[in-house]
Image (tube, rainbow, N blue to C red):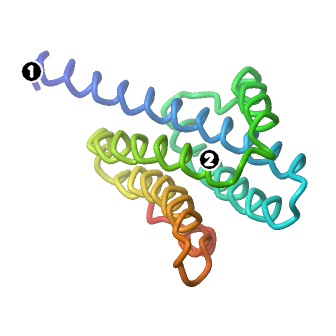
Amino acid sequence: MTREYLEKSHGAARDYQIYLEERFQGEVYGEALFRTMANLARDPERAKKFRVLEQLERQTKELLLPALREGGGSGAENPERVLEGEKLGASLANAPWTDLMRGFEKELRRFVQEFKRAEALAPTGQEGLLRYVTAHEQALLDFAIRELETSSTGDSLERVLELLRTHPAA
């Protein structure tokens, strides 16, 4: 093997590890965000929805953990990310629903695109994990969109619940 090949493959492995750490800490943040929103929501229906979203963030975080540790990451939750999630969650817990869902939709559209591009970082055999990370973000986006659609039929949490019932081929 050439030195150039080894450097390139080491760089790709490093990029993948960095991405896993970013996604893991993002899930830590999201879990804290939705937990806080559920705890502070005055509307019980909103609180239930936030609990389901919290569960999806936790499941995704837990699915990332083995690959993160395998690559040498500690898998320790960054307390600053938890506090950031809690702070934002407290400020959004009782925001006007339509405004909240529009804000979620805007951010989640951006994240879904970023996550799709990042799937290319997956080494052979780990593609399913990164596809799941993208799918979980897409499910959150689908939730926000369905909440905004006044003519929507069915459960806005349908995609989220589907992911919670299945496990990725990671």
**Direction from residue 163 to residue 37 in the image, left or right:** right
Of labels 1 and 2, the one closer to you: 2
Mark nearer the N terminus (1 vs 2): 1
| Residue beneath the point at 28% across and 42% down | 117
Q: Position of residue 86 (x, y in %)?
A: 79, 33
Toward the bottom, the furthest residue is 153
Q: Position of residue 4 (x, y in %)?
A: 12, 17
Q: Quadrant of the N terminus?
A: top left
Q: Quadrant of the C terminus?
A: bottom left
Q: Quadrant of residue 155?
A: bottom right
The three-letter amino acid code for the residue at tag 2 is Asp
| Residue beneath the point at 44% across and 59% down | 135
Q: Residues within 10 Å of mark 1 (few under 14, many from 20)?
A: few
**Relative to the observer, which residue lies in front, 122 or 22?**
22
Numbered circles on residues, count: 2
How far apart in space, not on screen, are marks 1 and 2 (Cα)? 54 Å
| Residue beneath the point at 19% across and 23% down | 8
Q: Which mark is residue 2?
A: 1
Q: Which mark is residue 99?
A: 2
Q: Position of residue 152 (x, y in %)?
A: 53, 78
Q: For numbered disc 2, what is the local secondary structure?
A: helix
Q: For numbered disc 1, what is the local secondary structure?
A: loop
